[in-house]
Amino acid sequence: MDGPVVVGVDGSPSSMVAVEVAAREAGLRGVALRLVHAFGWPAAHIPPGGRPWDARSAGVRELLDGTLIRAERCAHDTAPNLEITREVVVGEPVTVLEVESRTASLAVVGSRGLSRFGALLLGSTAGHLAAHASCPVLVVRRRPDPAGPVLLAVDGSPAARGAVEFAFAHASLHGVRLVALHAWSTRTERAYEAPADPPFVTYDEGRLHDEEERVLAEALGGLRERYPDVAVERRLVRGRVRHSLIEASADAGLVVVGARGRGGFAGLLLGSVSQAVLHHAECPVAVVRTEEK
């Protein structure tokens, strides 16, 4: 997709790091960068009988423009030849950025913004956008390591195919290796062939290990040939998925996850593994939704 890279800007330190990351991504992809500041003014905050808010008299317009100008300067410092547009849009950030994502190739946000909920590990805008955006979402946690590998969470589900493709493309663009991690245990759903209570199931661990190895290989099928420049490490780990990914993220430049996994809550737009990684990963996280056929 040749749409722009869209980045949410609110003037916070987290969003300024997101601008740097977004500028770098736009430059590598050869697309424009769009800086968006969503400005919402909830009616409930206006005192009864008070005068309607006027952006011109309040001087807020100058403040917002100044925030975007600083962001544009930061983007140009990162990628000097980048085409950049900037816009102040009236509306709640989660709604504005969701709409922007419909024509974007990538949406980038910081993990924390300027709000009264600043103590949260993951801002509401980042979490909502990761679940509902129409394009891949890159949530910037800490300052990324450009030389770190791409860590791909592999679960073998059709919903994760978009994440696999994104991870290979990202690794190729950045010239880094790809670590494809698949965590398994004897509680993996493929361990039982019929309904049963797990404590009473007898496992053939050797067979189960071979099956999980096959799942990992099939998930990468076709992509290694399409991206011969990407060095791939297949990592099969016995353990909890969330813990394994978060631990491995300490050495990664980016973690890539699908929006939904194969858990019992398939109706949720953002799976529990994706949510855990978004909250606790040691590096930026990309969440990629695969359109259902």
Image: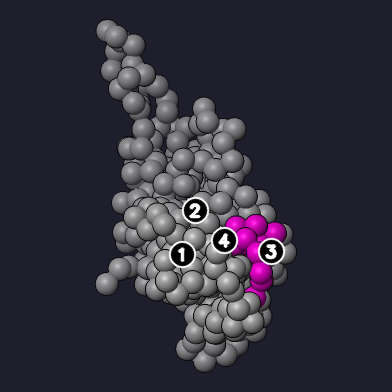
Looking at the rendered structure, the secondary structure element under dot 2 is helix
Residue 11 visible from this viewpoint: no
Q: Disc 2 or 4, which lies upstream in sequence?
A: 4
- Residue 33's label in the rendered image is none
How far, Cα to Cα, is label 2 from label 4? 23 Å
90 displayed left or right of 257: left
Q: Residue at x 32, y 20 (%)?
A: 44
Q: Amino acid at mark 2?
A: Ser
Q: Amino acid at mark 3?
A: Ala
Q: Local crowd at mark 1 within 10 Å, few (<14), some, or many (≥20)?
A: few
Q: Residue at x 27, y 7 (%)?
A: 49
Q: Local crowd at mark 3 within 10 Å, few (<14), some, or many (≥20)?
A: some
Q: Disc 2 or 3, which lies upstream in sequence?
A: 3
Looking at the rendered structure, the secondary structure element under dot 1 is loop
Q: Quadrant of the N terminus?
A: bottom left
Q: Residue at x 36, y 37 (%)?
A: 92
How far, Cα to Cα, is label 2 from label 3? 18 Å
- Residue 248's label in the rendered image is 3
Where is residue 197? Give x, y as percent. Answer: 49, 60
Q: Amino acid at mark 1?
A: Ala
Q: Nearer the viewer, mark 2 or mark 1?
A: 1
How far, Cα to Cα, is label 3 from label 1? 33 Å
1 and 4 marks in contact (CB < 8 Å) = no
Which range is magenta? Answer: 236-247
Q: Disc 2 or 1, which lies upstream in sequence?
A: 1
- Residue 199's label in the rendered image is 4
Q: Disc 3 or 1, which lies upstream in sequence?
A: 1
Question: Which residue is at the far right?
Answer: 251
- Residue 272's label in the rendered image is 2
Q: Quadrant of the C terminus?
A: bottom left
Where is residue 289? Give x, y as percent. Answer: 40, 64
